[in-house]
Image (cartoon, grey):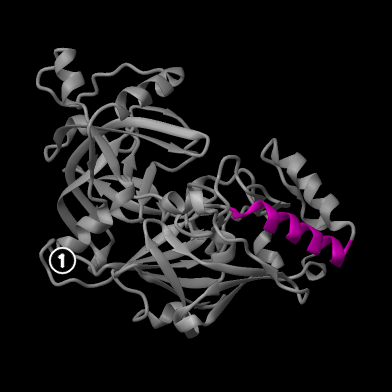
Amino acid sequence: MTQAKSKATSLRLHTNLAYAKGAYTVTLEFGSHRDQAQLVLDSGSSTLVVLPHAYDAYRDATLQPTALAQQINYGQGRWAGPVLTTELGLGEGIHARRLPACSFALVQADRQNFRDYDGLFGLAFGGLNRAHDMSAVLSERAVDPALTWPWPFDLQQDELDEFRTLVRQQPSVTVDPLFTEAHEDGVVNDKFAMLIRRSLVHVLDDAAQPHSLAGDPLNQGVLVLGGGEEHQELYEGPFRTVRLVHELYYNANLVAVQVGDQPRIPAPALDAKDVARAASNAIFDTGSTFVILEASLYDAVIEGFRACDPRFPDLIARFAEAFKTEAGLPNKAIRHRDWPDLHFYLEGEDGQEVRMTCTPGDYWQTNAMRAGQSYFLLMDQLKGWPKQSILGLPLMAGYYCVFDRRGTGVLRVAKAQGG
């Protein structure tokens, strides 16, 4: 097996929608016993985190505890746990690699629905992966040795907010993300690629277990760590290049959105007060099941749908009501041929524009979550969010996307093979 200091190459890994239901996961192996975990691939975060049911820290001979803890919020969810270091394995066969010492968090308290997956594999840049040095708190509580593992805090769900305040009062430390560690150890180059088929798990039998759903080709994707363009079997035709404008998230400049052949809708610029924290008016996020549009864009797109057919907004409203109970609409209620394509215009290289198209089959996905039901995958701006659109999996569906992280980076997109 190739070790960490081998010549950097690209690793092709299998991904699947069967476990997280609304995001792709990849299998990683933790510790000396190679405990396997299905981790969500999330370009909107940088944290590597695993749940204790998937990884047994007590039997790991390579475990190294630290004095660090992480407390992370994801929308409505949140979790807390210690930062640990252990050996980690990824890939199979000739694409298998082991890294001798990787940092990750082990969840000890959470208020989040992890569905059938076991944690998160953040693919964003290092500035997002913050932990806190709990040495002073541990000493004050006479924890000896002054380490966060075994976990010395007895937290209930309703105490996570209070613990968050305590953690943030401690010194902040940047933890190297797994992808950064793999690059710096010479395992892979500083880029990755994903082949994306859809954004919600495809279900033909509601009784099917995750391992059965994983066998459905529509639920399968590919992650290439350290490369992209050389895997010509994964895409068709030429690449087009979207300029990434900030090394934080995968920030891009969204120029306009178009409903079918209607006039383009200009995308508003980010408010000046939000530039420091949000950087641009759009981000690409592989951890987002939805395309979440800035409020004025969302309203304009809904009006564009109304112009196509006055019944369309009512169907969207019906879905929103059903979604409150995690249900969709019957497949037969949505005829894809009646709905328009959505075109997204983004700033490319040398002042050019790149158009990415979200088809009706991508924003109204059939047999989604349950057999026979369709989900509408456009969403209005999140409460408290800046004037920024989150370009999630529905826009990337049918594409092979290469995230080149060198410098501020670029995103190269081509048609997915067979897409």
x and y percent of residue 209 in the render?
53, 45
Q: Nearer the viewer, residue 389 or 403?
A: 389
x and y percent of residue 136 in the render?
17, 22
Determine if the magenta segment contains residue 240. no
- Tell me the magenta residue range: 290-309
- Quadrant position of the C terminus in the picture: bottom right
Q: Residue at x 72, y 46 (%)?
A: 328
Image side of residue 230 versus residue 378, left or right: left
Image side of residue 232 versus residue 62, left or right: right
Relative to 281, does residue 106 appear above or below in the rendering? Answer: above
- Quadrant position of the N terminus in the picture: bottom left
Callout 1 secondary element = loop
Determine if the magenta segment contains residue 296. yes
In the rendered structure, which amino acid carries the disc numbered 1? Answer: Gly
Image side of residue 94 versus residue 375, left or right: left
x and y percent of residue 10 in the render?
27, 71
Q: Can residue 366 be seen from the camera position used here? A: no
Q: Nearer the viewer, residue 301 or 111?
A: 301
Residue beneath disc 1: 186
Q: Residue at x 21, y 44 (%)?
A: 103
x and y percent of residue 285 in the render?
48, 57
- Judged by its main secondary structure, the magenta piece is helix
- Furthest residue to the bottom? 237
